[in-house]
Image (cartoon, coloured by chain):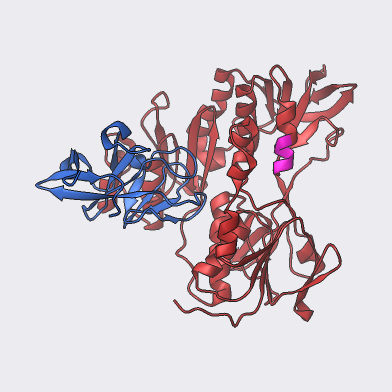
Chain colours: A red, B blue
Amino acid sequence: MNSRSDLGHVVVVGGGVGGVSTVGALRQGGYDGRVTLVDAGEFPYDRPPLSKDYLAGACSSTDLWLQSPAWFDDNRIELRTRTSVAALRTAEGALELDDGSRVAADRVVLATGGRAARPPLPGADGDLVHTLRTIEDADRLHKALVPGARLLVVGAGLIGAEVASTALDLGCDVVLVDPVDPPLVAALGTTIATWLHDLHTARGVRVVRAGVESLGQDGAVLTARFVGQPDAAEFDVAVLGVGMSPDTSLAVAAGIEVDRGVVVDPAQRTANPAVLAVGDATRVRRDGVLLPRTEHWEAAQHDGKRAAASILGVAPPAETAPWFWSDRHHRHVEAIGHLGAADQVVLRGTTDAPSFAVFGLHEGRVVAAAAVDDPTAVRAARRMVDRRLAVDPGALADPTTDLRRLLRG
Amino acid sequence: MSQGIRVASAEDIAEGEGITIGRDVAGTADDIALLKDDDGSIWALDNTCTHQTASLAEGWVEGGYVECPLHSSRFCLRNGEVDGLPATRDTVAHRVEVRDGEVYLFPGQTP
C-alpha cells in the first residue's frame, strides 16, 4: 500500500457514517496527507440507535460515537466539531466556516446528510410536534415519552415504526397514522410488510389508516384531524416520521448540480473536480439515469469508501446489493437488493415461525430478500445477488435447505 | 491448563458457522464463539459483538472473518480485529487446537 500525501488537504463536511467512513477509508487506503472532518455536532455519532436503544434510554450518548476520540487522534483526523461550513470556495482552494474564517481545502467531500422533513401541514411546526434526526431531537423526544403519554406517530415507515415500538415499551399510549397500509411493500414485499404492520396492532399500538389533515394545539393538548374523520383526536405529543430533506445548500451555492440531492457519478464525484459527495444527500447518475437517494446506513458507509478510492485514484470496493435493517417490537428485520425487480417471490418458512424470509427472483436469479429474525438468510441472499446466482425457488422456499450449501452450488 | 480445555468435536461445527461455549466452561469473562471458517479451520473469539449484544457464534463465517448477525461488522478470526463499522472495538481472540478431531480451547492465550 503506497502512502501518499500529494493530494493536499482533504476536508470532509459532516460527521455521520458517510463522513466518518470517508476519513477512515482515506487512512486505510494509505493517505498520509492532512485530513479534517468538520461537523456541527458535539462529536461524530451513529444515528440508527436514536429511534431504538438511545430513545429508550438504554444507552448513553458516548455509546453512539462512530469512533473514539483516540481513533481520530491515532488516525490524525483533525476534528472541527461545533463548526459549520458556510461556503465552498473551491476556485480558491478553500472553504469558509460559519465564524468567517477560511480553511485551505484541496478536496472537499460533502457528507451533509439532511433534516427530518416537515410536511406542509397546518400545525406541523407546533411545540408538541417532534421530528427525529439528531441526538438533540432524541433527547427532547425521550423527555416527552413519559408513561401514559398519548403519542401520535405520523408515518409508519422505518423511523415511525421504530419510534412507535420504543414509545410503547416506555409505557406510552401510541397511535400510528399512515394513509398507506401496509407501508414498505417496495422494500420488504407484501408478506413481510403486512406481517410487520400487523405487529403494531398485536402489541397494542392503535393503527389508523388515514392522512393527517391538520395538527393544532389547545393549551398543553395537541389536536390532530385525520382525513375523513369528523372529530379531532387529542394527544400529548406527536412525532413526524415522513422522510428527510437533503442538505444540499453548500452544493447549490457552489453551482454544483442538485436535483433533490447532490448529483454524483458512481465514484461519488460531482462535476466540480475538487468536490465529492456521499451519503443521504446524494443521488447517483449512472448511465445517464438519475437514481433515487438511498438514505440507508450501509449505503453511506460504502459511499465513503468509494469517495476515498476516487480521491486516491485506486479501484473502488466491489459493488454489493443495497442492505438495511430495522428493529421494531423486538423483531429484527433486514432486506437486501430490490424486491421490486423480482418477477417471482418465494416465502421461506411461515410467518408464524420464530423467523422467516422472502426471496425475490428475476428470471431465475436471486435479486433480493427480506427476513424477520433470520440474518443468515439475508447474508446468503446478499452473496446470491452479488454473484447473480440462479437458484431453484423450491429449494429457497424449503426452510430445511442449507442456504450456505446452495451458495456452494 | 497446558493441554487446553476440550470444548467440542470439530465435526460439531458446520463450515461457515459457529457454536457458543459457555463462560462457565471456558472460565472467561464472555462466552466464547467457536467458529469454523470455510476452509475448515477453527477459531475462537469472545462471543458478544463489541457493538451491541449480538452473538458472533450466530454470524456468517467466511474468508477469515465472522460477520455479526445484527449489523454486519466483521471481525478477523485470527486476531479479533474489527473490520468495519458500526463496531469500533476489537474483540478478543483465543488460541484453539484441534487434536484427533477434538477442539481444545486455551482461554486468554493469543492464537
x then y, percent, for residue B28? 33, 38
The residues colored magenta run A135-139
Camera-nearest residue between A271 and B45: B45
Q: Is residue A138 magenta?
A: yes
Compared with A191, A39 (above or below) is below
Residue A13, percent from left and from top:
70, 62
Image side of residue A167 versus residue A355, left or right: right
In the image, is residue A101 part of the stretch drawn in magenta?
Answer: no
Q: Which residue: 41% across, 51% down?
A: A382
Regarding residue A345, the answer to whether it shows in the image is no
Viewport quadrant of the N terminus of chain A: bottom left
Q: Main secondary structure of the magenta part?
A: helix
> Total label count?
0
Most distant residue in the right direction: A219
Q: Residue furthest front?
A: B1
Question: With A34 as the anchor, is A323 left or right in this view?
Answer: left
Q: Nearer the viewer, residue B106 or A405?
A: B106
Q: Is residue B28 visible?
A: yes
Q: Is residue A25 above or below residue B31?
A: below
